Image (cartoon, rainbow, N blue to C red):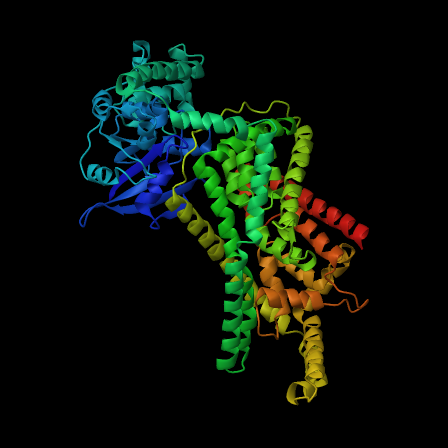
Amino acid sequence: MDKKKIALIGNPNSGKTSLFNILTGLNQKVGNFPGVTVERKAATLSLDKKTSVTLIDLPGTNSLYPSSEDEAVACDILRDVHHPDHPDLSLVIVDATQLKRGLLLASQIIDLGLPVVVVLNMIDLVEKAGNSISIAKLSQTLGVPVIQTSVLKKQGLTELKSMLQQDIPPSPKRFLSIPPGFQPALDQLKPLLQTEQDYLAYQAFLLPEQFSQIPAEVGRRLQQEAGLEEGKRLISNELLVRFDRLGSIEDAVTRKLSSPGLKLTNQLDKVLTHSIWGYVIFVGLLFLIFQALFSWASYPMDAIDAGFGALNGWLEQVLPEHWTTDLLTNGILAGLGGIVIFVPQIAFLFFFISLLEESGYMSRVVFLMDRIMRPFGLSGKSVIPLIGGMACAIPSIMMSRNISSKQERLITILVTPLMSCSARIPVYVLLIALFVPDYSVLGIFNLQGVVMMGFYLLGFVAALVFALLFKYILKYRNPSVFVTELPIYRKPRWESVGLMIYQKSRTFVVEAGKVILLISIVLWFLASYGPSSRMQQIEEKYAQVLETPFSDEALQDSLMQAYEAEKLQNSYAGHVGKFIEPAIRPLGFDWKIGISLLTSFAAREVFVGTMATIYSVGEGEANMDSLLERLREERDPRTGKPVYGTATAISLLVFFAFAMQCMSTLAVTWRETGGWKWPLVMVGYLTALAYLASLVVYQVLV
C-alpha cells in the first residue's frame, strides 16, 4: 500500500520550503515533476515507529489561477485526482503576518473539496508585535484544523506531526457562490473531470485550456452557450469577492495592536531601498561577499590542499610503479583535487545567497534593480534569474518561467550565461592568483577579491548591454508590469541555510565529479601516451636520466623537466592542442590552454582539473600551490618568455567571463525555448564575444 501523500502548498515567502526542510532534513529526493522541468522535492517523514508519510513540496503559488509553469504544476496536482502526486491531504502554509493573502489560496483549495490543514506560520512575529489570532475561531470559520507554528523557533512541529496521523475530512464550508447560470455547463464538465465539486468544474469552465481532460471544442462550445466572453474578468471578480470575505474573517479572528516588526522594516527600507544609498549598500554587500571568498575560505582551502598533496605522496610511496598508480595519482586525484579545493568558496557563496533570501533582503534587491532593468527590456522579475546566475545558469534559466512576457523571458535566458556562475570561481581564483599579489588594500580589502568582483561586474554590465541589443533585435517595447511583495525582515533560519549549503555543495562536487573523473582519465591517457615510434625515441633519448642518478640534483631535475615537457608535447594531447593552437595563439593561448578550453565546455570548473592533470603528469602533487608554481615556470619554447604572463592571464579571464558556460546550459536552453534556434544563437554570440574581447585585451596588453 502506498504511503499517504501530503502536499505542502503556500504563497512564496510563506515559509513552506523551510518547513519542508526542517521536517525532512537530508532525506529529500530531488528530481523533476513528470513531463516538466520544474524541480520536485519529496521525502518520507516518520510520524511514529509504525507510521510514515510522503511529503511533497509543491512550487509556491498565490492562487489556483497560475501565471507561470511552476504555479501551473502545483495547480495541476491539486486538480487532477489521477496525477501521481495528487495529495491525500494538503498542508496550506499561511504567513500569519499576511493572513488574508494566505487564506485566499487556502479557501480555493477548500472549495476544491480536498482535505486541508492550515499551518499558520510565523505566529511568533504576530505575537511579538503585540497582536493575536484566535486559532479556534479561525478553525471554526474555515471548517479545517489550524496549527500555529514558528519554523524559525521550531514551535508547533509536534502538534503538526500529531495532526498528520489523523484522518482529516474535507471542510463542509464553501467560500464562493457560483452564479446559477453556469450550473448547466458545470454539470456537463463534472463527468469529464470525474468530480462532484462545482468549483473544480467552474475553473475548467473559465480556463479549459489548463485541463487536459477537456477537449478544446467542448470548452469553447460551453463558453459560447453561457455567453462567456471574458474569463479573466470573472477570475478577477472571484478574487475580489474572496478578498472581501476573507477580510471580514481576518478582522473577526485577529486582535491588532502595534507592529514594531513592521515599523522596523519600514525604517530599514527607507535606507535599503533608497534611490542612491540602496545601490551603494547592495554593491558594498557584494564587495564583502567576494572578500570572504578569498580571505575566509583560504583556511579550509589550505587544509584541503595539504591533504590532497599528502595523500598523493603517500600513495606513490606505498603503491608499486605501474600505470595504474600513475593513473590514480596523476590522473584521478589530480583532477579531483583541482575541484574539491574550491568547495569552501562555493559554500561561502551559497551561504551569503541563502542569508539574503532568508532575511527578506533579496526581495529588496529585486525591487531596486527593477529601476535599472526596464530601459534594457527587462524587469525586476528578470533580476531573480540573473542573480541566480551567479550560482548556476541552469536553474536560473528555468526560473525565468515566472516572467509572463515571452520576449522578456527569452532576453533573460539569452543573457543569463553572462553572469559569472559559481563554476567559474575556481578559474577566477587560479588565474587571478597568477598576476594579482595577495596583499591588503587600505589594510582591510584583499586585492584579489577586488579584482574578482570586477569580473562579476563585467559580466553584469555585458548582460545589460546585450539585453538592450536583443530588445531591439526582437523589437520588444513593453516590459511586463512588475509587482512584488516586500516581506518584513526576519532572522534567517540557520538549519535552512546549512541545508542549502550542503545540498548545493554536494551537487557541485557530485555532478562535477562525474564529468571530471571521466575527463581526468581521458586526459591522463592522452597526456601519457602518444605515437609509439616518437615516444620510444624520447625514452631512448632520456634513458640515462631515467636510470642513472646524477650527483648534481639541480641538473637532473632540469633534465627530468625537459623529458616530461617533450613527452607531453608529443603525446596525443599535444597533437590535439597543436591542431587548434593557430586559432587561439592570437589570444595568447598555447596548445595546453587549448586542451583545457575544450574540456571546460563540459563544465567550467573542469578547466582547473584539466590544468592540474596536464601539469602534474609525471609529478606527484595535485595541490594548488604546485599548479601555480608550474604555471609560473612555464616558458614559451619560441620566445623563452613566461606563457602565463599578465596579458595572457587577463585575456584568459576575459574569455571565461564571456564564453558559453557549459553544454548543460546549452541543453537547458534548448529545452526551455523549444528548439535549437536560440541555443545556437546563444553559443554563437557568446563565443564570438569571448574571442573578440580576449583578442583585443591580449593585443593591447602584450
Q: Position of residue 188 (x, y in %)?
A: 31, 19
Q: Identify the residue shown where x is 49% and y is 72%.
A: 311
Seen from the viewer's position, the closer of residues 369 and 144 is 369
Q: Position of residue 438 (x, y in %)?
A: 64, 57
Whether residue 558 is situated above or below residue 114 in the rendered picture: below
Residue drawn at (55%, 39%) of the image: 387
Direction from residue 206 to residue 112 in the image, left or right:
left
Q: Give x and y (percent) for residue 137.
A: 22, 22
Outermost front residue? 443
Residue 328 in sight from this viewpoint: no
Position in image of residue 331 (x %, y %): 56, 69
Q: In this view, does 649 lie above or below 82?
A: below
Lateral position of residue 106 relative to residue 491, left or right: left
Instruction: State the residue in front, 454 or 558.
Output: 454
In the rendered image, which quarter is residue 520 located in? bottom right
Number of numbered discs present? Answer: 0
- Does the rendering let one see residue 302? yes
Residue visible at 80% across and 55% down in the picture: 702
Q: Is residue 146 above or below residue 647?
A: above
Residue nearer the viewer, 678 or 646: 646
Determine whether, in the image, residue 8 is placed left or right of residue 409: left
**At x 50% / y 39%, what residue is drawn?**
398
Name the quadrant containing residue 123: top left
Judging depth in this view, the residue of 623 and 318 nearest the camera is: 623
